[in-house]
Image (cartoon, rainbow, N blue to C red):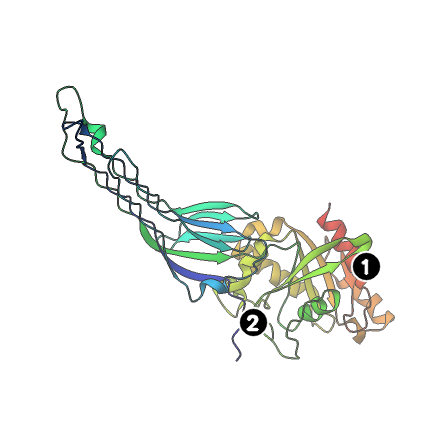
Amino acid sequence: MAETNFVDYVKIFCRSGKGGAGSAHLRRERTKPRGGPDGGDGGRGGDGIIRGNSQLWTLLHLKFTRHLFAGHGGSGSSNQKSGAAGKDIIVEVPLGTVAREEETEKILFEITSDGEQKILLKGGRGGLGNTHFKSATFQTPRFAQPGEPGLEGYFILELKLLADVGLVGFPNAGKSTLLSVVSAAKPKIDNYPFTTLTPNLGIVQYRDDKSFVMADIPGIIEGAAEGKGLGHRFLRHIERNSVLLFMIPADSEDIAKEYAVLLEELRRYNPELLDKKRVMAISKCDLLDEELTDAMRPLLPGGIPVVFISSVKGTGLISLKDLLWRAINS
């Protein structure tokens, strides 16, 4: 199988810079043979920084660069000159990236806007020069403070896609076909389950030059919340979506039952997902005539707007876009 360019989970090792040592220099000049202490402070160590970049959509650039080291601070010198600050190591990540400690799995922060910066590891402080330790009774300190050591550790960077609409459904429900028709995205499409192995994003054009982002994730199967299939790995991508579009094919044996199973999997993974706005699309309606469509309506689950669509024929796609746009902006 060809390797995908989409990477949404990486483990990195980061080390911040250590602070520079303070100087214990004593001033010695021909005109001032006993000039006293004039040692400067050490420079701070470089920080490990995570920065959001709206032009990125994957963590692929970190897949083979997993060791990140910031620069060390420079030592202080004579004439109270401070050492140079260590160079920060700045890692750019796509929006929606969550950073967590590898050992405790504690969430440290998340990046949600372009240019947003968070410090992953703080660099060590520079040591104080001997000028800080002089006093009226101790005029010639011959020592200075060493710099603080840097910090290091393993961290997990996890990407949760930011999209307006997330496609939810069992494998082979027509999610990728819909995305390929309503947007310029080109996901892999075939007539077997789990054709989609990685999430896909597409920008859906709407009326008056408006648009919204749609995300297609691998199909969910019963038990996905416990790790069955591929759903468990990618369910986190639904957490950032404004609207959930449930897609169930028209040839399904029991549409209401499939919808209930999908809802239960979302509830078991994260109960807050049930608070999101929901829309249902009955896909593959090119298999139905008008009489069968009317016969199916009473069997559909209540409390959710439903639209019948055919991605192949383009039937119902305008109505679907209208429904999704109202849900996004309501």
Residue at 74 percent across and 71 percent down: it is 250
Q: Residues within 10 Å of mark 1 (few under 14, many from 20)?
A: few
- Looking at the image, residue 233 sits to the left or right of residue 129; the answer is right
Q: Position of residue 292 (x, y in %)?
A: 83, 71
Q: Earlier in the sequence, mark 1 or mark 2?
A: 2
Measure the C-alpha gap from mark 1 to mark 2: 29 Å
Residue ID for mark 2: 197
Q: Position of residue 175 (x, y in %)?
A: 67, 68
Q: Residues within 10 Å of mark 2 (few under 14, many from 20)?
A: some
Towards the viewer: 281 or 324: 324
Q: Position of residue 66 (x, y in %)?
A: 39, 62
> Which residue in the rendered view is the most extreme toward the front?
30
> Which residue in the rendered view is the most extreme toward the top?
136
Residue at 82 percent across and 68 percent down: it is 315
State the image quarter where residue 207 is shown. Answer: bottom right
Q: Position of residue 108 (x, y in %)?
A: 43, 47
Residue ID for mark 1: 319
Q: Nearer the viewer, mark 1 or mark 2?
A: 2
What is the three-letter code of the residue carrying label 2?
Answer: Leu
Query: Secondary structure beneath disc 2?
Result: loop
Q: Is residue 64 above or below residue 14?
A: below
Towards the viewer: 274 or 134: 134
Residue at 45 percent across and 57 percent down: it is 157
Q: Is residue 111 above or below residue 254?
A: above
